[in-house]
Image (spheres, helix red, strand yellow):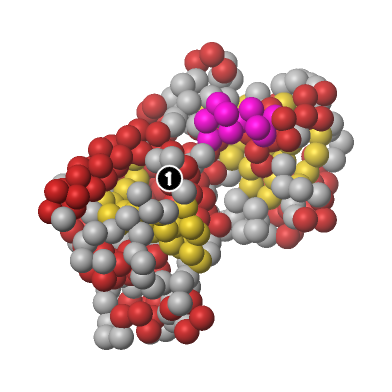
């Protein structure tokens, strides 16, 4: 098989999912960050006249033959390109789209979408959460890369901060409630390993950083704090506190096997509420104050299962192409 193309709009969360799937399929991957121009970006993945003109001239040279045997896209912008690629290659490229493209999934060879999106079709593969690279080897690498965390007092509480989205406010009231809940746990001992994302409001970062400064551990909020310790946080965590906004962070936390807790203070948007409910039903998510033993937690690891299903379909496609040559 020729190398796979991993196509995204450059968003880190989208690229992370697509790369995780390529790695689970054990195929070499070429990453193409290909943002779309207007008006194609506004309509994607619906087609407008012009096709490849959706890309800037400098990007069209990358989106050109020889076409790959496999393309993995994530996000609406990528969905237009994987849709076009399926046709441009005369369907010799097996085109996989991650996340609900918001149109009929028949335009792709396979669509991988979380269950809470409610997408159905013969070529749809449902997951509970998002695809990610977290497995035993990934966690071991994280512990090795940030070995100093081993010396922090246990239990080590990892705190993963996301950011504001529709229906979820990262305001002073939420910062105070979250800090109070974490502090209550830390009063009984242990340390804290906290990280903010690019979406976390600066005032929220300051509140949490100041409030947690009296406890052993560290707080990362950007390059000024050194290398991003995210793999080390997940690798060394005895328990994980995640803000409720991010499907990706909740999915990755649930993949570690450590107890995962969140604080919800207002009704969640419908899709996100369904995702939370599914995690809770599985035993992968708990209230902030809930005491959960690690031995009670089964890691949520879906990427390998999805890759196995796709691998069978891809092999069948390649055999049919070879037979017709």
Considering every residue shown, the one lying at the far left of the view is 324
Q: Main secondary structure of the magenta part?
A: helix
Residue at which label 1 appears: 27
Q: Examine the rendered structure and indicate whether residue 154 appears above or below residue 103.
A: above
Q: Which residues are magenta?
A: 134-143
* Residue 73 in sight here: yes
Position of 240 with respect to 278 (left or right) is right
- Residue 224, percent across and down? 82, 56
User: Which residue corresponds to the image point at 54% horizontal and 13% vertical from the top-left?
Assistant: 295
Quarter of the image where one finds residue 130? top left
- Residue 120, percent across and down? 20, 49
User: Which residue corresponds to the image point at 46% horizontal and 21% vertical from the top-left?
Assistant: 298
Q: Is residue 138 magenta?
A: yes
- Residue 297, percent across and down? 50, 20
Q: Secondary structure at mark 1?
A: loop
User: Which residue corresponds to the image point at 70% horizontal and 29% vertical from the top-left?
Assistant: 143
- Residue 49, percent across and down? 27, 86
Position of 237 with respect to 57 (left or right) is right
Q: Nearer the viewer, residue 5 or 1?
A: 1
């Amino acid at each position: 098989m020729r190398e796979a193309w991993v196509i995204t709009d450059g968003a880190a969360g989208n690229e992370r999912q697509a790369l995780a799937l390529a790695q689970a399929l054990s195929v070499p991957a070429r990453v193409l960050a290909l943002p779309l121009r207007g008006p194609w970006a506004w309509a994607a993945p619906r087609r407008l006249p012009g096709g490849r003109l959706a890309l800037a001239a400098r990007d069209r040279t990358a989106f050109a033959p020889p076409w790959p045997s496999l393309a993995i896209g994530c996000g609406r912008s990528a969905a237009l390109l994987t849709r076009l690629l399926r046709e441009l290659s005369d369907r010799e490229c097996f085109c996989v789209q991650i996340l609900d493209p918001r149109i009929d999934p028949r335009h792709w060879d396979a669509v991988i979408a979380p269950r809470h999106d409610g997408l159905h079709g013969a070529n749809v593969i449902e997951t509970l959460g998002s695809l990610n690279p977290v497995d035993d080897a990934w966690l071991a690498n994280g512990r090795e890369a940030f070995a100093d965390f081993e010396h922090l007092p246990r239990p080590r509480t990892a705190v993963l901060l996301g950011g504001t989205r529709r229906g979820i406010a990262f305001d002073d009231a939420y910062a105070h409630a979250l800090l109070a809940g974490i502090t209550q746990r830390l009063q009984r001992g242990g340390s804290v390993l906290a990280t903010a994302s690019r979406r976390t409001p600066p005032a929220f970062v300051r509140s949490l950083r100041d409030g947690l400064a009296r406890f052993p551990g560290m707080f990362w909020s950007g390059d000024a704090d050194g290398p991003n310790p995210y793999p080390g946080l997940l690798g060394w965590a005895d328990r994980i506190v995640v803000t409720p906004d991010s499907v990706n962070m909740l999915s990755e936390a649930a993949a570690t096997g450590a107890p995962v807790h969140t604080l919800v203070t207002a009704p969640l948007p419908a899709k996100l509420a369904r995702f939370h409910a599914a995690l809770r039903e599985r035993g992968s998510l708990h209230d902030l104050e809930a005491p959960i033993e690690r031995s009670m937690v089964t890691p949520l690891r879906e990427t390998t299962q999805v890759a196995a299903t796709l691998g069978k379909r891809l092999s069948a496609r390649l055999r049919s192409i070879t037979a017709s040559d």
